[in-house]
Amino acid sequence: MRPKSFAGMRCSVAGALEAIGDRWTILVLRDLSLGLHRYDALRASTGIPTTTLASRLRNLQGHGLVERVRYQNRPPRHEYVLTEKGRGFWKVITALREWGDRWDLAGCGAPTLELFDQGTGRALRLALVDSSTDLAASPARIRYRPGPGADDAVRALIDSINQGANAWPQQ
């Protein structure tokens, strides 16, 4: 059974899910963002079936997240490189990794990968920041408002959310 398409839904999350498609694609994007570029390396890292990997890479190309680039002429060989749009997905991967680490969803007892500042060596974590001050925002202060693309349904949803006591998930 083919999953329902989210195309045409007035929601950026739905649009992103339409472009990504499934969990294999997220693992492929993870590995591309970590520096793997060759088909065999992606397959070995994820354990993804060959036909599934080919399909996911075509989908990523079709949505402009990945480019197929020839690196050898004889015999012809290609690698896969993230576009600017694809490189922007690292925040989603980081958020998923941090959530998985917090709840030990891999069952390892500790994180398997950490981000750190190259200059200070201190650990880094994803945060929402004020666009003017670059200061991290406390979850208690975060609220929603309609964006320029909002329709009446989105405005009604946001009004409903903002009337509730918990407009943002508390940490």
Image (cartoon, rainbow, N blue to C red):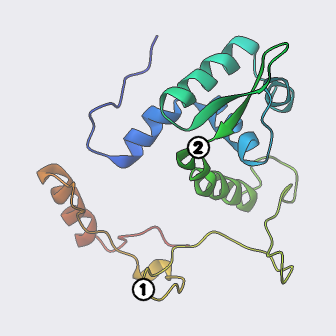
SS type, badge 2:
loop
Which numbered marker is on residue 159?
Answer: none
Gap in angstroms between the C-alphas marked 1 and 2: 27 Å
Q: Which of labels 1 and 2 is toward the front?
A: 2
Mark 2 sits on what residue? Answer: 83
Mark 1 sits on what residue? Answer: 132
Residue 133: image location, x then y, percent: 47, 89
Residue 21: image location, x then y, percent: 52, 30
SS type, badge 1:
loop
Residue at 84 percent of width and 33 percent of height: 45
Q: Which residue lies furthest to the front in this view?
A: 73
Amino acid type at circle 1 is Ser
Residue at 79 percent of width and 45 percent of height: 35
Q: Is residue 23 left or right of residue 32?
A: left
Amino acid type at circle 2 is Thr
Residue 12: image location, x then y, percent: 36, 48
Of the pair 119 and 96, the residue shown nearer to us: 119
Of the pair 24 and 119, the residue shown nearer to us: 119
Residue 130: image location, x then y, percent: 45, 82
Quadrant in which the C terminus is drawn: bottom right
- Asked which quadrant contains residue 2, the reply is top left
Residue at 52 percent of width and 47 percent of height: 85
Q: Is residue 43 left or right of residue 129?
A: right
